[in-house]
Amino acid sequence: MTINTDAPDEPGTTGSDRRTFLKWSAAVGGTAALVPTATQLGMPGRASSAPAEEDTTVYWSACTVNCGSRCPVRLEVKDGTVVRVLPDNTGTNELGSQQVRACVRGRSIRHRIYNPDRLKKPMKRKAGTKRGDEEWETISWDQALDEIAEKMEDIKARFGNEAIYINYGTGTLGSVMAKSWPPDQSPFARLMNTWGGYLDHYADYSTTEITAAYPYFYGTWVDGNTFDDVKNSELQVMFGNNPLETRMSGGGQLLVSQQTRKEHGVRTIIVDPRYSETAALLGDEWVPLRPGTDAALIAGMIHVMVTEDLHDQEFLDKYCVGFDEKTLPKGAPKNSSYRSYLLGKGPDTTEKTPEWAADITGIPAVKIRQLAREIAGAKPCAITQGWGPQRHANGENSARAIFLLAAATGNVGIPGGGTGAREGAQYLSIVEPFNTELINPSEKIISVFGWLDAIQYGEQMDTFNAGVLKKPAPGVRDGEVPVDEKGNATNTRLEVPIKMVWQYSGNSIVNQTGDNNASIKILQDDTMCELIVVCDIQYTVSARYADYILPGTSTAEEDDIHPGENGGPMAYGIISSQAIEPLYECRSIFDICTDLAERLGTKDEFTGGKTREEWLREAIRQSREVDPTLPDYDEWKEMGIYRRDLGPGVSLADFRKNPKANPLPTPSGKIEIYSDRLAAMAEKWVFGVFHPEQAGDRLVPLPEYVETWEGPLETRASDEYPFQVIGHHFKGRTHSSYGNVDWLKQAHHQTAWINTVDAQDRDIENGDLVFVYNDRGTIRLEARVTERVMPGVISVPQGAWFDPKGADEVEPPPEANPDHPVDVGGNTNSLTSLHPSALAKGNAPHTTAANVVKA
Amino acid sequence: MTETPSPTPTTGPSESVSGTGTITRSGSGTDAGADYGFYFDQSLCTGCKACGIACNDKHDLPVGIMWRRVVEYSGGSWLLNEDNTVTQDVFTYYTSIACNHCEDPICVEVCPTTAMTKREDGTVYVDDDKCVGCRYCEWACPYSAPQFNAEIGHMTKCDLCFDYRSEGLTPACVAACPSRALDWGPIDDIRAMYGDQSGLAPLPDPSLTDPHLVITPHRDSERWDHASGRIANPDEI
Amino acid sequence: MAFDRTLWEHHAAAFGVLGRLHREPPSDEALTAIGALLDEWPLPDGPDAAAGLARLRCSRDAGEDAARVRADHDRLYGVSAVALVAPYESVHRGEDRLVFDTATLEVREAYRALGLQAPQLNLEPDDHIGLELDFMAQALLRAVGAPDDALAEAALAPARAFLADHLLPWAPAVLARVEEAARTDFMAGVALLTRGALDSCRSALGLPESDAARR
């Protein structure tokens, strides 16, 4: 029956003729099943036995996407339905206890929860169709999980556990029980750990190159100082750092950096190809540079400092190796120091004068001199980098070069200074036993960007040709530096190809990886990757390419813990309460994995004998063992958000105070400007095995500028693809999350930013539809003709939903590759390459050459 | 009404912090004679539009009606030098704008049915019973604050969240701003604290209506009568 | 004028069967049974009803089977994921184009006034077109079952109000889109027949023809 009734029987409602009604009802599927009998029905106005619940209740919830912030939202629920999203109403306007106001996306969360396009039931790709054909069969949960378990058993029997891969996904990284990242702490990883392990990846799509660069400079990942520490600075310099758009929470780095500026007014210089909101508001000066040329700018600046003796030689001598010949490690060739590189005594015999740097970066030499003098003269100077500079084919070196600038000016480890890394923040110690107590026995690990290669080439891949690494210890999601104690590079080989890809709450199957059209081709051959399972709440682009789609629950439908993120001096955490029932047939990832574990025979190990809620309580119980001042679970849940002021943080302060007692985890214990481990690896590294060798495919021991494929010099000399295309983070989406929310699409249009000068040359006006294309693909979107992007550069906000149209619907421009569809969603990865960066084997999305024409 | 220069948070029934935290309001939030208005710090606005979304959500506005809009205003130029370098003097700033509950509300003046009314607290609202949707106010208002809702056939506009204020709550846009760029209060208090600038491009000559609006200008802000830039996001406002 | 029980029973029958078909695609047996009954459609032949019956006959004669209809139904209404034409009132009438919005809660209230509720309360939206049609069927049946004509006439009030406040403002236009987007004659036919039934009922209840309902 379609509508239930609990109304009392009414007299006198029988006896009429309903022959027609009964006959038709019988035809479509049985009267009783369809319509209640008359005797169950009440009369109008007398039968309202279920009065409406007029009262509203407000529940603490959170926005859990990967924006680098973490906001509470309060959901106003009426009659089982979220009717409004309210902001945090606790805290103050003071840093350290700040109110955490959700940004425009968090405020739109109801549009994710109640999006009509939500996944509703398990689905299976129809037999005989290709991945991406989007022909689906709706199936039961039992059938879906039975079939997935059966296929997993089969893959395990034929290839072993390392043929099963957990793909990068950050759609719910801000939760504990619904955690999608890091992958080794996700519920499916726990399940796989009970069942023999899986193949994992190191790094992430946000930071592949800088993550790979760290060990060879600082020995490990280090943060910068916190943004509130800038109050101690004389000058702040940001390289591709854009907290006002990439850390948008009103309790996060946006607020920390803006309030610090408002109160202390420290002069700020922004180096970025785009006049970002940070450049417009936080910066006093904008220095536009060609994408991917940060290392050249820094070489030019340090050349000035060395020439004019403005650098901190004492710091370099005491804390660093390889700036000068005298501090080079034993065995390093002559003239391999950074100073030799600057003075043209190295292999390239080119002096790195400001004029040399000007030609590459586009920054006038006179400006480079001014910058060098100002930065060197500011004591102290807070130098940070965002993750744009490193998201390039030469990004490992850009990252190291910016670290180097902080070192050469002696700013590392002091208040008001910084490491040249991205700003840090204070955190609570939240223990997450559900996510971390089981260990993955697999000892090998691939780059986050290597999975499509591992599907195709599997056992051919090793350290030297593809960056396959050994883990430093069991269960540690990291790659060990592949150099042994004698200084020789070591090799680790993958044994099997990837046969199953699990994607939970992520959109990295097409859309967020690279080269959409090439990716699809690889994935459509289901003899290679045999099983793709996607679990999400929205029908994402990744879901289109799945074999099975499992509908998950949103944060509003769950209780969970959300550790705070990037609150500057304020450490905090949120405990959310389930506000509404799971919609449709949606199920939590804990329940899904529990039922899958049951089929694989490891249910008890997976659940650990606890319910979802018991795990949440256990997390807080164990956290309180570490930090007894934390509130207990029930108190915390009641208050929603708990905060604590820990004050400014200074990174590497111990090392600065006493480098002997607190050495860095590099072989020398010091900052390695010259890395002899990179030198050893460079001898063994092989290029051109899985991707054609290209300019820039080399490892270098120094943080020098390496011109690469599709870099600034290549594009400026090209008639075919004269633009560098970068993909900035923007306000309407977090990567691809919220990408299907109409409110946000209306408030923040997906556009291609093109400089007024370039647009004029091509007769493009603001708002015109344009094609941006290269050999790998074509996108069509509105042009935003603006002064705010450097000439020769096009910036397209990354993360839009790939929406390919065949030539029958949208004809590509004559110059574009006719083999590819036109992506009218405007996804940047329709243009980017699968060619990995040299050291990280990472994605290099901002290294992309293309052309633009009016549509 | 009182004001304190120190950043003391305001406390209401359920909203403990509002705006920049620098304007303290006492009384009911709808006091007669208070002449409420908005404060906007242009040097903090990132153009994120959380204010507009919060307003749309609070007032259930249909697509196409935005009582609070955020205008991007950009200008400057580029010089391509012979040595492959570039120089520029680019600038951008955002202005979040709703109804300014003007001292001389031209919308009230032109309304033929007296539907557009000034409350005793100085805020301007539409009397739904009287409005015939002639749109004179929309055409007259230099800020395009009154907007026509075709579905209900009459004008709609910001009332500075009269219902929220009546309950001691903060207007939705003010409470939403991640950057704390918005605040509200009696206009005299705001002016005493922040001065009296509101004639900044691309906004019109303030002498037209004497808006209850005070703006702390962005460093590159241009006066309304010395504008060199242009509205960069006409499609989004 | 005497209360025409047959007229209202016929409308209830039409809404009952159409509601079911919008909610769940028919089995092969049901398709056969419907095919055999087409000549006995209980409502008068307006243009939409006639066109709808014609499409359903085409479907029957072309041998469209349950699998095809099911696939089309899923594709149109997004049973598993994305809908071409979302079957929920709030998506078409709400400012936010969302499910579980103002209209959903209003419809829930209307159901409750007759002691009814959606089968999957709070899990699936109450304002699915199939549920709204079912509500019409049940509301009309109550009138049909009333002990005397005066009470029966009075008992039409909830149906009249619901049709005017909920179905008419959105369903005819959305059904036109369903008809256009359908890949099967069956789904197109069901959409047309539903438009016809709504219009017939509107006229019988003495409601004015609205601009929105016209194509």
Image: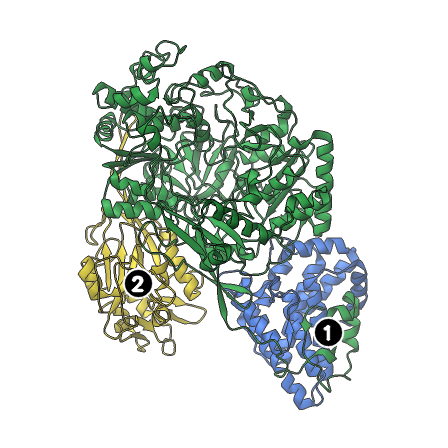
Chain colours: A green, B yellow, C blue
Could you tell whether A751 is left or right of A578 in the image? left
Q: Name the residue: 28% across, 58% down.
A: B21
A766 or A836: which is nearer to us? A836
Residue A568 in picture, x, y percent from top left: 36, 44
Tag in front: 2 or 1: 2
Disc on res. B10: 2
Badge 2: residue crowd in 10 Å (few <14, some 14–19, many ≥20)? many
Residue B225 in sight here = yes
On whether disc 2 and disc 1 are found on a single subunit, the reply is: no
C28 or C180: which is nearer to us? C28
Indicate whether A86 appears above or below A814.
Answer: below
Disc on res. A36: 1
Residue C65 in picture, x, y percent from top left: 77, 55
A46 or A145: which is nearer to us? A145
Indicate whether A414 appears above or below A739.
Answer: above
Indicate whether C134 appears above or below A314.
Answer: below
Q: Name the residue: 51% across, 21% down.
A: A482
Q: Amino acid at mark 2?
A: Thr
Disc on res. A233: none
The answer to which quarter of the image holds residue A163 is top right
Q: Amino acid at mark 1?
A: Pro
Residue C135 in picture, x, y percent from top left: 65, 73
Q: How many marks?
A: 2
* Secondary structure found at label 1: loop
The answer to which quarter of the image holds residue A444 is top right
**Marks 2/1: CA–CA distance:** 56 Å
Could you tell whether A550 is left or right of B174 in the image? right
* Secondary structure found at label 2: loop
Indicate whether A285 appears above or below A624.
Answer: above
Name the chain under label 2: B
Name the chain under label 1: A
